[in-house]
Image: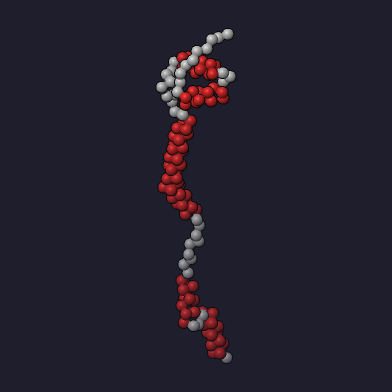
Amino acid sequence: MDSFIGIRFKKETAKRFQEFSRTHFKSHTEALETMLDFFFYNEISPHEKLGPTGRTIEASFKKRINAVIAIMRDMEKTQTKPTAAMIASLFQTEAPQKKPLILEKKILREKKDGVSKQEQDSLEERDNSDNNL
């Protein structure tokens, strides 16, 4: 059987270690051996940072995504919508306004005077028929 040795830790640190050890390992010895092996085999110091954490990576992704969204909205406002409006205006077909013919102008003038061209023609025919009698 292996012999044990007592090591002095602060009470708060010992409690933290015991909680961690109980949740992840079978014994405190196994927990401490695994931690020491991790630092030894990976050749890192416990004081070094291993790189960005999941939270910092997520925050940087969110910033980049928000920047891309802002760029897309700006493109839509300055490029896409004006171009679409110009193309839509090109494809809109409005019937050109008809200019009345010269004859139509005469008829319109006569209507304004109160007597239409047809009425004048019919009056002239009556006068001609009366003269023939």
Please say if 115 is above or below 5.
Answer: below
Residue 128 appears in the rendering: no
Quadrant position of residue 118: bottom right
**The N terminus lies in quadrant:** top right
Quadrant position of residue 9: top left
Residue at the spot 42% in from the left edge and 45% down from the top edge: 74
Image position, residue 32 (x, y; %): 51, 17
Residue at the spot 45% in from the left edge and 35% down from the top edge: 59
Residue 114 appears in the rendering: yes
In front here: 59 or 94?
59
In front here: 34 or 77?
34
Image position, residue 7 (x, y; %): 47, 16
Residue at the spot 43% in from the left edge and 42% down from the top edge: 71
Image position, residue 26 (x, y; %): 58, 19
Image position, residue 125 (x, y; %): 55, 84
**The C terminus lies in quadrant:** bottom right
Which residue is the extreme one toward the bottom? 133
Residue at the spot 42% in from the left edge and 19% down from the top edge: 45
